Image: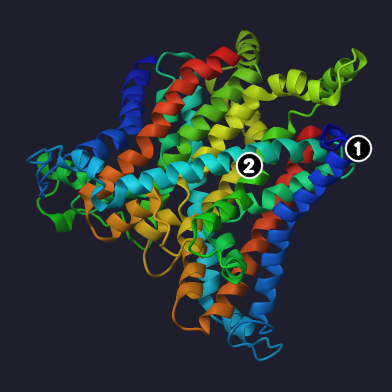
Amino acid sequence: MKHLKHPIAIFAFLAFTMPYVLLFVLSIANVWNFPQLLPSGYSTKRWSGLSENTGGLLQSLQLSCMIGLIVATFSTITGFAISRSISLHSKRKYLLFACYFPLALSPVIYSLLLNHFFILFNLSGTFIGIVIAQLIITIPFGILLLSSLWNENMRSLEQVSATLGSNLRQTFFRVLLPVALPQLLVCFFQIFLISWFEYGLTTIIGVGKVQTLTLKVYQYIGEANIFYAALSSCILIFPPAIFLWLNKRFVFSKFN
Amino acid sequence: MTLENMLFNNKIVNRSGIICFMLLVVLPFAGSLIYAMLYAFGLTGILSIGFTTTHVSGMLQNPEMFFSLGYSFYIAFCSILLALILSLSGVLLFKTTISKSKWSFFPYLPLALPAIVTAFVSLQVFNKTGVLSRVLYQINIIKNLSQFPDIVNDKFGIGIILTHVLMATPFFLIFFSNIYEAENVKALSNVAKSLGALSTKIAKTIVIPILLKKGLNTILLYFIFVFGSYEIPLILGQQSPQMISVLIVRKMQRYNLMDIPQGYFLSIVYSLAVILLLAVFLKSKNQAIS
């Protein structure tokens, strides 16, 4: 079997890195006619045009960043607080199970079902509407992810802290928060990614008015503008990939 | 009562936590389903005429709904099956090197790709003028474009399945590799080996059953995710049959107002299917815990 391992590993390596290479090459390509294997010319004009907000890509990047940061911050804090309340509730098993429903439903269908209420409250097609719609999905995710924090160990720590005379504020800031920090960071990062990659919900609630990066990618695919679709895809995927690498290299290894 | 006491008083905090949970998680979900039900039965909406089963019976008599549900099930089943075969084979071949070697970052790379970008990549690789057909043309396997098969926008959903496999395989590879390590499968395999078991027997009776049993919940959740996927079939699918998410969006976003109640009814059917699958998930999770 050993001789097989090497070619399979090479094939897997190519398959995992191929999307990044292909998208980058297309983002700098000029002409790519059939049957040429590689584009016939390259230029960095699309990348340099980013600073001039060509096609509104820079604006979309800022918008996606802002929505992601707000949603991730709010969901992590809310998830942390609510997961604690749930962990102390007698029906916690059922409450946690209820968190799976908004997550398991396809976001595009859930947003279609919610759309009427967003129109009713004049939130459809607005920035705040998109943030609220994403929160409806990400808060249950945060609760599920952080619910494992509130175990017997955590309760014992709270009790020890109280026995040693600290008040609730000190227990929270000096004991619970430092212990929970790694999981809070993971939660923040994952929710940021959910928001960053969100398409279905944003397109329905945003009715095309809130142009995030994912909407830009789809717009360019629809226009058959593969070079700009590749450029917007690159902007969408390179930051999370670098962030993932940094996380794996430094954050997770440190916590492990 | 001081602000500090109010903020950190356990009873108040716990009660307000549960109220927030009800407002942010339960109310939107329940409210949207109730509204969908009222709309589907003609009790609300622009064309509301009072209680009627016309829309529901119209949808039930239309084979489109059943085709769409069946097609979504077929896509999800094939995608998960292929991804499981590939990822389990990968774990059997490489074992813990997936998570421990210096190359272990690479399986994580596809996880940073959103569905819409993966679909775009598949389109550029598998369409008639894509990378694959260019490679086959250059090495003289095909002579012209018509000889290249329809992989995207085809009736069997091959493009959709391949794209889901591309997304799911690295995920399951990392997932199973972690289980392999956590469950100490290597030690169990070594014991079996020292007792004379062959590698194929060890894989069949020890490694694969442990990995599948421990990963059952995640496999089920991933199945639900693929079943309701939207962006990939939107870009790589055909007009007919359509996956359930695409069909619902088409029904509810079209200019024909008569289609909207049917779209709501379809949403309820889809939601019930998801709830049913989640119930199975909960049951298997409870069994795993007990």
**Mark 1, secondary structure of its residue:** loop
User: Residue B241, how many percent across, how many down?
Assistant: 43, 68
Q: Quadrant of residue B69?
A: bottom right
Considering every residue shown, the one lying at the far left of the view is: A40
Foreground of the two, A158 or A229: A158
Foreground of the two, A48 or B115: A48
User: Residue B79, how many percent across, how many down?
Assistant: 47, 47
Q: Is residue A152 above or below residue B137?
A: above
Disc 1: host chain: B
Q: Which quadrant: the C terminus of chain A? A: top right
Residue B267 visible? The answer is: yes
Q: Do labels 2 and 1 share a chain?
A: no
Considering every residue shown, the one lying at the far bottom of the view is: B49
> Residues at badges 2 and 1 in contact (C-beta under 8 Å)?
no
Going by the image, does A136 lie left or right of B133? Answer: right
State the separation of the CA atoms marked 2 and 1: 28 Å
Q: Quadrant of residue A96?
A: top right
User: Residue A237, how many percent across, how many down?
Assistant: 37, 38
Amino acid found under the numbered disc labelled 1: Met
Judging by the rendered image, the residue that carries numbered circle 2 is: A75
Disc 2: host chain: A
Residue B122 visible? The answer is: no
Q: In this view, does A82 lie above or below A153?
A: below
- Which mark is in front, 2 or 1? 1
Judging by the rendered image, the residue that carries numbered circle 1 is: B1
Going by the image, does B45 lie left or right of B71? Answer: right
Identified at 17% across, 55% down, the residue is B147
User: Residue A99, how many percent across, how many down?
Assistant: 71, 48
